[in-house]
Amino acid sequence: MSQPTAPDVVGNPQAGATGPSPAAAAMPNPGRLFQTFFAYQASAAMKAAIDLDVFTIIGDRQTTAEQIAVRSGAAERGIRILCDYLTVMGFLTKKDSQYGLTPDSAVFLDRRSPAYMGSVADFLDAPELLHAFDHLTDAVRKGGTVMSEEGTVSYDNPIWVQFARNMAPMMKMPAEIISKLVGAEKGGRCRVLDIAAGHGLFGIDIARHNPQAEIVAIDWPNVLEVAKENARKSGVESRYSTIAGSAFEVEFGKGYDLVLLTNFLHHFDVLTNEALLRKVHAALAPEGRAVTLEFVPNDDRVTPPDAATFSMTMLGSTAHGDAYTFAEHERMFSNAGFTRSEHFRQPPMPESVIISYP
């Protein structure tokens, strides 16, 4: 009897085996441990491929290890091993000696794509963040980061300039979703306060959809320079103003129709958040809304995976941050004076939107 032949294309997430038998699945599996112990290599391989422009080169039809090596200026052996590894990970395909892009890689990792996200690795894999997890055992013992007293939320931390410059591509989808959820395209006068604005895309996107929207962005001075640069590029500079400083210290003003709290509350403990939310409540117009973007796990705190595991990021990098459930968010907003909150999961986006009413 002849042996079955292996498929000639590997690395395609839509192809492959149907999985282990029920009996095999029930057996203890040391392979999972092996994969986890070596997991650091996955992020390192992705970062190397981005630095060497591997995905863009393959997208430009230079698809053999030799061709990619010539274009990238790397050793052919190194490229072959790297591309084989990325194929196993599911970011490349391989047929004979030719590599190809998977749909995700073509959209998000080829520099010529308008949805390119390669810059995100410069922030998420920044040495400052990786260093925090070199001492995770100590962080678990302490219950918070051992990077410094406050971790990434220390006063005017320069890492947030890097965040503003590198993370914008990943925020385009949630910015569009928030604009739709708040009905920005309907127009009308709208004053928007964007707290910890970073790159500014959330307020900017609302201003792009609504020509009567006026945005006020709060963040550290150097971070706001990035936001203002993005506002100029988007043609909304005349309706974009800023307040420099800590959101916990500066005066917000009053009468805002929308207050944006995007990727912010997870950095702090409940009481700190409630103090901030009382300021937000006081700043809103009577018919205004607070719009929160967060990683929101279910009440079991282990599902869905992307939201649930974000607590680990906060343990390693902040003193008191967490990924809060919707019930916990709802309680914080209620204690700050809000009457109700609505939760919107937006797959495939890993984050949720919460809209709260005064």
Image: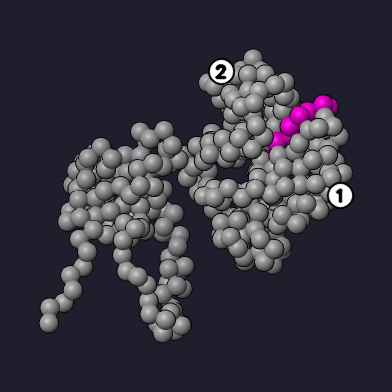
Q: Is residue 113 above or below residue 15?
A: above
Check disc 2 and give the amino acid type: Gly
Per the rendering, the mark at residue 235 is 2
272 displayed left or right of 292: right
**Left or right of 187: which side holds 339?**
right
The foreground one among 196 and 144 is: 196
Residue neighbourhood size for the residue with mark 1, other residues' Cα within 10 Å, grouped as few (<14), some (14–19), many (≥20): some
Q: Residue at x 84, y 49 (%)?
A: 334
Q: Residue at x 31, y 52 (%)?
A: 92
Q: Is residue 245 visible?
A: no
Q: Cβ–Cβ below 8 Å for labels 2 and 1?
A: no
First to last magenta residue range: 251-261
Give percent across and percent down for residue 22: 42, 81
Asked whether, in this view, residue 98 is left or right of residue 37, the answer is left
Residue 257 covered by magenta stretch = yes
Using the image as rendered, state which of residue 144 and residue 98 is in the foreground.
Answer: 98
> Is residue 257 among the parts visible in the rendering?
yes
The local crowd at label 2, few if under 14, some if 14 to 19, many if 20 or more residues have their Cα within 10 Å, is: few
Can you say whether 92 is above or below 257 in the image? below
Q: Position of residue 102 (x, y in %)?
A: 33, 49
For this view, does 190 lie left or right of residue 174?
A: right
Q: Residue at x 69, y 63 (%)?
A: 299
| Residue found 78% across the figure and 33% down from its top | 288
**Mark 2 to mark 1: distance in Å?**
39 Å
SS type, badge 2: loop
